[in-house]
Image (tube, helix red, strand yellow):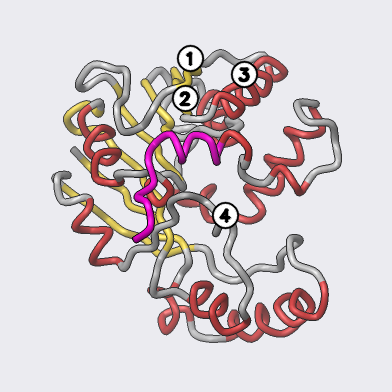
Amino acid sequence: MSRVATIDDVRAYWNDHIHDLEITRHPVGSRGFFDDLDQYHFEKLHHLLRLVNFDGYRGLRVLEVGCGAGVDLVRFAQGRAKVTGVDLAPAAIELARANFAQQGLDADLQVANGEALPFPDARFDLVYAHGVVQYTANPQRLVDECRRVLKPGGTAIFQVYNRISWLNALSKLMKVGLEHEGAPVLLKFSIGEFRRLLSGFREVTIVPERFPVKSRLHGGWKGALFNGVFVGAFNLLPRALVRRFGWHLLAFCTK
Protein backbone atom coordinates (compact mmCIF):
# COMPACT_ATOMS: atom_id res chain seq x y z
CA MET A 1 0.00 0.00 0.00
CA SER A 2 1.48 3.34 -1.04
CA ARG A 3 2.00 6.08 1.52
CA VAL A 4 -0.47 8.97 1.45
CA ALA A 5 1.26 12.21 0.49
CA THR A 6 1.48 14.87 3.19
CA ILE A 7 1.62 18.64 2.93
CA ASP A 8 5.34 18.38 3.76
CA ASP A 9 5.84 16.14 0.72
CA VAL A 10 4.01 18.70 -1.42
CA ARG A 11 6.14 21.56 -0.04
CA ALA A 12 9.40 19.72 -0.69
CA TYR A 13 8.47 18.93 -4.29
CA TRP A 14 7.29 22.43 -5.23
CA ASN A 15 10.28 24.06 -3.60
CA ASP A 16 12.32 22.35 -6.37
CA HIS A 17 9.79 22.32 -9.24
CA ILE A 18 8.34 25.78 -9.86
CA HIS A 19 6.21 25.94 -13.03
CA ASP A 20 7.82 26.80 -16.40
CA LEU A 21 11.35 27.70 -15.27
CA GLU A 22 12.78 25.55 -18.07
CA ILE A 23 11.45 27.77 -20.87
CA THR A 24 13.93 30.63 -20.34
CA ARG A 25 17.71 30.89 -20.68
CA HIS A 26 17.97 34.16 -18.78
CA PRO A 27 19.48 34.02 -15.28
CA VAL A 28 16.92 33.09 -12.64
CA GLY A 29 15.53 36.24 -11.05
CA SER A 30 16.58 38.60 -13.86
CA ARG A 31 14.22 40.94 -15.69
CA GLY A 32 14.54 38.84 -18.85
CA PHE A 33 13.69 35.74 -16.82
CA PHE A 34 10.43 37.22 -15.53
CA ASP A 35 9.55 38.66 -18.95
CA ASP A 36 9.96 35.19 -20.49
CA LEU A 37 7.80 33.62 -17.78
CA ASP A 38 5.06 36.17 -18.39
CA GLN A 39 5.18 35.77 -22.18
CA TYR A 40 5.11 31.96 -22.07
CA HIS A 41 2.45 31.80 -19.36
CA PHE A 42 -0.04 33.97 -21.25
CA GLU A 43 0.86 32.37 -24.57
CA LYS A 44 0.08 28.93 -23.17
CA LEU A 45 -2.91 30.13 -21.15
CA HIS A 46 -4.16 32.82 -23.54
CA HIS A 47 -7.72 32.24 -22.37
CA LEU A 48 -6.91 33.79 -18.98
CA LEU A 49 -6.68 37.28 -20.50
CA ARG A 50 -10.20 36.80 -21.87
CA LEU A 51 -11.79 35.16 -18.82
CA VAL A 52 -10.09 36.90 -15.88
CA ASN A 53 -10.47 40.68 -15.49
CA PHE A 54 -7.01 41.41 -14.09
CA ASP A 55 -7.71 45.16 -14.25
CA GLY A 56 -11.12 44.90 -12.57
CA TYR A 57 -10.10 44.91 -8.88
CA ARG A 58 -8.70 48.40 -8.39
CA GLY A 59 -8.60 49.19 -4.66
CA LEU A 60 -9.93 45.73 -3.75
CA ARG A 61 -8.18 42.95 -1.84
CA VAL A 62 -6.97 40.06 -4.00
CA LEU A 63 -5.40 36.88 -2.61
CA GLU A 64 -3.58 34.38 -4.81
CA VAL A 65 -3.13 30.95 -3.25
CA GLY A 66 -0.15 29.18 -4.80
CA CYS A 67 1.26 32.33 -6.39
CA GLY A 68 4.52 30.76 -7.61
CA ALA A 69 6.78 33.41 -9.13
CA GLY A 70 3.90 35.91 -9.08
CA VAL A 71 3.17 36.03 -12.82
CA ASP A 72 -0.61 36.29 -12.45
CA LEU A 73 -0.45 38.30 -9.23
CA VAL A 74 1.65 40.98 -10.95
CA ARG A 75 -1.20 41.47 -13.44
CA PHE A 76 -3.66 42.15 -10.60
CA ALA A 77 -1.16 44.55 -9.00
CA GLN A 78 -0.73 46.40 -12.29
CA GLY A 79 -4.50 46.87 -12.22
CA ARG A 80 -4.09 48.60 -8.81
CA ALA A 81 -5.53 45.80 -6.67
CA LYS A 82 -4.23 45.38 -3.11
CA VAL A 83 -2.54 42.03 -3.60
CA THR A 84 -1.50 39.24 -1.27
CA GLY A 85 0.22 36.08 -2.43
CA VAL A 86 0.92 32.88 -0.53
CA ASP A 87 2.82 29.78 -1.58
CA LEU A 88 3.83 26.64 0.25
CA ALA A 89 7.32 26.80 -1.27
CA PRO A 90 9.83 29.34 0.11
CA ALA A 91 11.66 29.30 -3.26
CA ALA A 92 8.50 30.49 -5.01
CA ILE A 93 7.98 33.38 -2.60
CA GLU A 94 11.61 34.42 -3.03
CA LEU A 95 11.07 34.60 -6.80
CA ALA A 96 7.76 36.44 -6.42
CA ARG A 97 9.42 39.06 -4.20
CA ALA A 98 12.15 39.59 -6.81
CA ASN A 99 9.51 39.88 -9.55
CA PHE A 100 7.53 42.54 -7.68
CA ALA A 101 10.65 44.44 -6.63
CA GLN A 102 11.91 44.66 -10.22
CA GLN A 103 8.55 46.04 -11.37
CA GLY A 104 8.25 48.53 -8.51
CA LEU A 105 4.99 46.97 -7.33
CA ASP A 106 3.78 46.29 -3.79
CA ALA A 107 2.51 42.97 -2.49
CA ASP A 108 2.16 41.09 0.77
CA LEU A 109 3.96 37.82 -0.04
CA GLN A 110 4.08 35.03 2.52
CA VAL A 111 5.13 31.41 2.80
CA ALA A 112 1.88 29.77 3.87
CA ASN A 113 -0.19 26.62 3.49
CA GLY A 114 -3.35 27.06 1.42
CA GLU A 115 -5.04 24.42 3.55
CA ALA A 116 -4.58 26.65 6.66
CA LEU A 117 -4.53 30.27 5.49
CA PRO A 118 -3.17 32.80 8.04
CA PHE A 119 -5.98 35.32 7.47
CA PRO A 120 -9.24 36.19 9.23
CA ASP A 121 -12.63 35.28 7.82
CA ALA A 122 -14.12 37.41 5.03
CA ARG A 123 -10.96 39.43 4.27
CA PHE A 124 -10.65 39.29 0.47
CA ASP A 125 -12.80 40.41 -2.46
CA LEU A 126 -11.21 37.87 -4.81
CA VAL A 127 -9.41 34.61 -4.06
CA TYR A 128 -7.51 33.22 -7.04
CA ALA A 129 -6.15 29.65 -6.95
CA HIS A 130 -5.04 28.66 -10.44
CA GLY A 131 -3.39 25.25 -10.68
CA VAL A 132 -3.29 24.53 -6.95
CA VAL A 133 -6.24 22.32 -6.00
CA GLN A 134 -4.96 19.34 -8.04
CA TYR A 135 -1.58 19.34 -6.33
CA THR A 136 -2.45 19.71 -2.64
CA ALA A 137 -2.77 16.97 -0.03
CA ASN A 138 -6.38 17.82 0.89
CA PRO A 139 -8.20 19.63 -1.95
CA GLN A 140 -11.45 20.06 -0.04
CA ARG A 141 -9.67 21.72 2.85
CA LEU A 142 -7.95 24.17 0.48
CA VAL A 143 -11.25 25.07 -1.23
CA ASP A 144 -12.95 25.53 2.14
CA GLU A 145 -10.15 27.80 3.36
CA CYS A 146 -10.42 29.93 0.22
CA ARG A 147 -14.15 30.29 0.81
CA ARG A 148 -13.61 31.15 4.49
CA VAL A 149 -11.33 34.12 3.79
CA LEU A 150 -13.56 35.40 0.96
CA LYS A 151 -16.06 38.19 1.66
CA PRO A 152 -19.76 37.40 1.19
CA GLY A 153 -20.57 38.19 -2.43
CA GLY A 154 -16.89 37.88 -3.35
CA THR A 155 -15.46 35.75 -6.16
CA ALA A 156 -13.17 32.74 -6.03
CA ILE A 157 -11.47 31.43 -9.17
CA PHE A 158 -10.10 27.88 -9.23
CA GLN A 159 -8.48 25.82 -11.99
CA VAL A 160 -8.03 22.05 -12.10
CA TYR A 161 -7.19 19.42 -14.73
CA ASN A 162 -10.01 17.75 -16.62
CA ARG A 163 -9.79 13.96 -16.39
CA ILE A 164 -12.14 13.59 -19.39
CA SER A 165 -10.03 15.72 -21.75
CA TRP A 166 -8.15 15.60 -25.02
CA LEU A 167 -4.76 15.95 -23.33
CA ASN A 168 -5.32 13.21 -20.77
CA ALA A 169 -6.39 10.84 -23.57
CA LEU A 170 -3.51 11.87 -25.84
CA SER A 171 -1.00 11.39 -23.02
CA LYS A 172 -2.12 7.80 -22.55
CA LEU A 173 -2.28 7.08 -26.30
CA MET A 174 1.19 8.46 -27.12
CA LYS A 175 2.74 7.44 -23.79
CA VAL A 176 3.95 10.98 -23.13
CA GLY A 177 3.92 11.99 -19.48
CA LEU A 178 1.96 15.00 -18.30
CA GLU A 179 3.68 17.96 -16.70
CA HIS A 180 4.62 17.32 -13.04
CA GLU A 181 3.59 13.65 -13.12
CA GLY A 182 6.21 13.11 -10.42
CA ALA A 183 4.46 15.42 -7.97
CA PRO A 184 3.36 13.81 -4.67
CA VAL A 185 -0.25 14.67 -5.58
CA LEU A 186 -1.60 15.07 -9.12
CA LEU A 187 -5.39 14.89 -9.31
CA LYS A 188 -7.73 15.11 -12.29
CA PHE A 189 -11.43 15.84 -12.00
CA SER A 190 -14.52 15.36 -14.10
CA ILE A 191 -16.77 18.41 -14.33
CA GLY A 192 -19.21 16.76 -11.91
CA GLU A 193 -16.47 15.94 -9.39
CA PHE A 194 -15.17 19.49 -9.55
CA ARG A 195 -18.64 20.90 -9.02
CA ARG A 196 -19.13 18.72 -5.92
CA LEU A 197 -15.83 19.99 -4.51
CA LEU A 198 -17.19 23.55 -4.84
CA SER A 199 -20.65 22.83 -3.46
CA GLY A 200 -20.19 25.23 -0.51
CA PHE A 201 -20.39 28.25 -2.83
CA ARG A 202 -23.68 29.96 -3.63
CA GLU A 203 -23.05 30.04 -7.39
CA VAL A 204 -20.54 28.13 -9.52
CA THR A 205 -19.82 28.44 -13.26
CA ILE A 206 -17.34 25.94 -14.74
CA VAL A 207 -15.63 26.75 -18.05
CA PRO A 208 -13.51 24.13 -19.90
CA GLU A 209 -10.45 25.69 -21.55
CA ARG A 210 -6.88 24.94 -22.69
CA PHE A 211 -7.30 23.47 -26.14
CA PRO A 212 -4.33 22.32 -28.27
CA VAL A 213 -1.75 24.95 -29.17
CA LYS A 214 1.80 24.44 -30.41
CA SER A 215 4.19 23.61 -27.60
CA ARG A 216 7.87 24.46 -27.06
CA LEU A 217 8.33 21.74 -24.46
CA HIS A 218 8.34 18.58 -26.60
CA GLY A 219 10.85 17.76 -29.32
CA GLY A 220 11.54 14.84 -31.64
CA TRP A 221 8.97 13.07 -33.76
CA LYS A 222 6.29 13.23 -31.07
CA GLY A 223 6.66 17.00 -30.82
CA ALA A 224 6.58 17.34 -34.62
CA LEU A 225 3.48 15.16 -34.86
CA PHE A 226 1.74 17.10 -32.10
CA ASN A 227 2.59 20.58 -33.42
CA GLY A 228 2.41 19.81 -37.12
CA VAL A 229 -0.60 17.51 -37.33
CA PHE A 230 -2.64 17.15 -34.17
CA VAL A 231 -3.00 20.83 -33.24
CA GLY A 232 -4.26 21.81 -36.67
CA ALA A 233 -6.59 18.83 -37.01
CA PHE A 234 -8.12 19.31 -33.57
CA ASN A 235 -8.80 22.99 -34.15
CA LEU A 236 -10.68 22.22 -37.36
CA LEU A 237 -13.32 20.38 -35.32
CA PRO A 238 -16.46 22.35 -34.36
CA ARG A 239 -15.82 23.89 -30.93
CA ALA A 240 -19.29 22.87 -29.74
CA LEU A 241 -18.26 19.24 -30.27
CA VAL A 242 -15.05 19.43 -28.24
CA ARG A 243 -15.84 22.20 -25.74
CA ARG A 244 -16.23 19.97 -22.68
CA PHE A 245 -12.90 18.21 -23.34
CA GLY A 246 -10.62 21.17 -22.55
CA TRP A 247 -7.63 20.19 -20.37
CA HIS A 248 -8.32 22.97 -17.87
CA LEU A 249 -11.52 23.45 -15.92
CA LEU A 250 -11.91 26.98 -14.56
CA ALA A 251 -14.52 27.65 -11.91
CA PHE A 252 -15.89 31.11 -11.13
CA CYS A 253 -17.55 30.93 -7.72
CA THR A 254 -19.62 33.38 -5.69
CA LYS A 255 -19.82 33.14 -1.91
Magenta span contains residue 12 = yes
Q: Up-down: is 109 above or below 219? A: above
Where residue 90 appears, x then y in whole percent?
Answer: 56, 24
Q: Amino acid at mark 2?
A: Gly
Q: CA distance from mark 1 to mark 3?
A: 9 Å
Image mark for residue 180:
4
Q: Up-down: is 206 above or below 11? A: below
**How many numbered marks does the figure carry?**
4
Q: Nearer the viewer, mark 4 or mark 3?
A: 4
Residue at mark 3? 97
Query: Could you say which is closer to the camera, residue 119 or residue 213?
Result: 119
| Residue at x 62% of width, y 40% of height | 18
Magenta span contains residue 249 = no
Residue at mark 1? 108
- Number of residues whose C-alpha sits closer than 10 Å to that of mark 2, classed few (under 14), some (14–19) or many (20 or more): many
Query: Could you say which is closer to the camera, residue 184 or residue 133?
Result: 184
The answer to whether marks 1 and 2 mark residues whose Cβ atoms lie closer than 8 Å is yes
Mark 4 or mark 1: name the one nearer the start of the chain.
1
Mark 1 or mark 3: name the one nearer the start of the chain.
3
Q: Amino acid at mark 1?
A: Asp
Query: Could you say which is closer to the camera, residue 195 or residue 90?
Result: 90
| Residue at x 42% of width, y 84% of height | 241
Question: In the drawing, does residue 52 fall left or right of residue 140?
Answer: right
Image mark for residue 85:
2
